[in-house]
Amino acid sequence: MTKKKNRNVGIVGIGMTEISSHKEYQNQPEMINEAVRAAIADAGINLKDIDCVVHGNMELFEMVHQPDLWHMIGTGALGKPEYRITTGGTTGMTLVAASDNLVASGMYDVVMAIGFNKLQEAGSTTGGITNMADALWYRHLQTGALTSTSANMTIEEFGAERARKAAMKHRIMMDKHAGLNERAHRRFGLEYEQMEDLMKNSPRLIGDLRLIHMCSQSDGACVLILASEEKAKKISKKPVWIRDHIAVHREETASNAYFPILSENSHRVAARKLFARNGITNPVEYFDVFEMYDPSAWWGIEWLRDFFLLEGDQAIKMVENGDWDLDGKVPVNPSGGVTASNPISATAMLKPAEVALQIRGDAGTHQLKREVKHGLASGFGGVMWTELMMLEKDLNW
Amino acid sequence: MKRVAICAVAQHEIKAKIWYKRFQDMLLDILEDLQGETGFTFGGENGVKNIITCSDDFFDARTISDNAVNDVVGAANYRGEQKMAQEGLNGIGYAMASILSGHDDVIYFAGHCMESLSASRNQIANMAYDPFYCRCLGLDYLNAAGLQARAYMEKTKITQEQLAKVVVRARQWASRNKYANEKTQLNLGDVMYSSVLCDPIRSLHAYPVSDGAVAMLLASEERAYEFTDNPIWITGFGNCMDSYFMGRRDLASSSALKKAAEQAYKMAGIKQPRKSVNLVEAMDCYAYQQPMWLEGLGLCDEGKGGAFIDEYGPAKYSINLSGGMLAGRPLMIGGLYGVAEAVLQLKGQADEHQAADVNCAVIQSTTGGAGQFQTVVVLER
Amino acid sequence: MAKNELNTQAEELISLQVVNSIDYSFPTGPIMGKWFQGLKEKKFYATKCPSCGRTQTPPRGCCALCVVRSEEFVEVGPKGIVENYDIAYYASPDPLTGKVRATPYAAVFVRMDGSDRDIFTHGIKDEDIPKLKRGVRVRPVWNEVRTGSIEDMLYFEIDA
């Protein structure tokens, strides 16, 4: 049963801070304020035009309880309605999806969504993530978001050499993309010639998951301003329309969620449902860009198969053929992705933000050459939670 | 605008320390109660596909606190779930938006909080303050309330006896509510001479440490009658953020609450709340907050909270017939429990604490120190 | 002021090192309580869903797939098959103690004998790490002193 959206919603303002691990010169509200100002300036509006603020993060990271209360000095929420919604790693995108609901409902016309993380203040991201495990039994085992199970399964399916090469190729491709993005956190300047060397020498974290494969620990903030169709058209010459979004969750523990004993991957289920209800039968053909939440290169190559509803070695072949590259069939992560920049609670918001920049033609040095009309963005969180969103240049559905 | 309904509610009994269950167990109990009453299911063509929860990482000592309960709220099998990380009443607004937007048509909403897990809820509240200044001063929600209580008492000249009446009345009503926590009956003297907790707040002015969980089923107007003959309509919603630094606020008067109430009344088409509203659930964590929030809701003249109590204002508006926050509710869902009470009252299902002719209820909740963030909901049948 | 100057000044003036510590106590509830009791007796209990028959180890009161109360206990294991594993070469600090484990150490994801569509995770004996591969059988190694906690089981070892 397809439900009709009450009214259309467009992204009219995008603001980001630089993403780095050295933001000692700002405190949390200051960092947020920088992104807020940038978004408001981008939209060409004033703070008073914002009807509602939406905020979210994983508070045990910065160790501030109900942080929106303090952050209001930076968010500009004084005297305004505000919601605080959190969903682990998918938070950033959930905030955009929630803002979409809030505007589409008719309750608010212009909503500002704020995602941020100051992981430096936590000491250790992995330690912070491990806190999500059940205190009675799982906490002493979980190693944050680090796992080699994906690599193990990919290796078993395709053979060690092919799998490792694909993962490393994907990783280097991500770095090359990041190299073009002046806002990315980590840009190593990797070359494909380094593949063999990295495959051997990058320090191992867990099993075949090596340091080079894994996402960074970053600080940064991202803000998106969403408006109703009527207001969006007045505010912006190029609003980016949010067509649809879906959230799909799997279970509590890594042990059940990562395994295909029962389960289709939640990304695949999300893609299947979202595309079916929007009449997309060939996602590889349809989408012009995909900003994927890929915490590691291994997950990256595994999940491309799921998001595009591919089978067998179709996705890994596309890695080998460069089909996910900037000039490929579906460019993936022209921003460099999560391995380059990961301010966790903002990361999932950076995904639709980057897609929106591409659609607007405002991505600067990492702007795709092709025309970008149909964008896809994904969020991932623990455990095996998916948030998937479709963005469009035109109101064409 | 089409309407959104609360079809039914389920409450877990509130106790000072539910040591014999995990919060997942509490949530399972109320899920079964709610399913029993409404027959709702998860998934499939007509089942719930999106769930909203309310909980807190600090209270649960768990990053992504909703991860722990995804299975028992029906989200762990390929469904969506979002967590309200403010007091639960805000989830009503978000659920309403999700349904009015067309994205969802039925939502299961479940919140939990066990204050007893941590050694001190004040320590948790202290962590809400910025690490450079306010936290180091030792601010928490209790002493923030103390500062506000002092300001309010100065302005209104509310007396110890009037404050005591609020607490005594809360216990009287709590004794009729099978879900309420603290039912010990008190007399005025017990309260007035109870030990000072945080001057001017006395120990019996404060809400007891509590554990609980509450769930409800919300649906669009098209589907509400599948689950109940008696849907309760969410006609108004508003929330509003005040200044973080207490020195920037007029502590004795809640401008955020007034704004939140204004939004809610406007949405509900209520121009004269004193004529329309006949039931109130206010989140009175500390005794002075009951009259103060009622001023903010426009049901009591500004600065006249004391007289309001003496003139039986609380009885007139059927305020906190559940016992309210003062009888004990956990902080994160103090407002959600208020919704549960209001829904029962509107449906005529409030047993021994039922008021007559209830058709318009206002529920208020607050998040943060000294009511920094305020939320108001209007429900009607 | 140049950012570098600001940074130096910032480190001197603004950086506050604090260790935040709040004590908590967690109830086990009757379901987990029974599981820990089982560990004390060197047994693994799982709850079994009355609707789909899936088992859950550790047990949860509700079947995550069917969302129905699952209170029937069945015994599973004590042996099982390694479905997958993680050998950690990098140790993250324990969130509660801040301690860092010696590496390498490994976690195994085990399908316990008699379980149905369920995976149980625990550690594996360090000496067995080189022999780890998918499909290998393992058995638990019990702590001599058992109190009804996750430490009652030390780790799995390969069941030669």
Image (cartoon, helix red, strand yellow):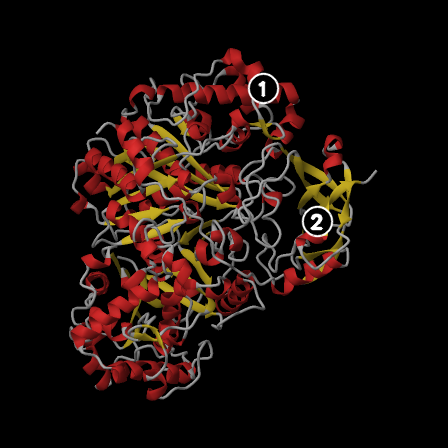
User: Secondary structure beneath disc 2?
Assistant: loop
Marked residue chain, label 2: C
Return the residue found at the far right.
Answer: C160
Quadrant assignment for the C terminus of chain A: top left
| Front in this rendered view, residue C18 or B271 | C18
Return the residue found at the far front.
Answer: C12
Q: What is the x, y in percent for residue C133? A: 73, 32
At label 2, counting other C-alpha atoms closer than 10 Å, the crowd grade (few under 14, some 14-19, many 20 or more) is: some
| Image point (24%, 48%), residue name | A73
Answer left or right for A66 relative to B278.
right
Answer left or right for C106 relative to A275.
right
Q: Are marks 2 and 1 in contact (CB under 8 Å)?
A: no
User: Secondary structure beneath disc 1?
Assistant: helix
What residue is pinned by disc 2? C116
| Image point (34%, 54%), residue name | B136
What residue is pinned by disc 1? A201
At label 1, counting other C-alpha atoms closer than 10 Å, the crowd grade (few under 14, some 14-19, many 20 or more) is: few
* Quarter of the view holding residue C92: top right
| Label drawn at residue B327 | none
Is B256 situated above or below A241? Answer: below
| Front in this rendered view, residue B68 or B270 | B68
Could you tell me the amino acid type at mark 1? Asn
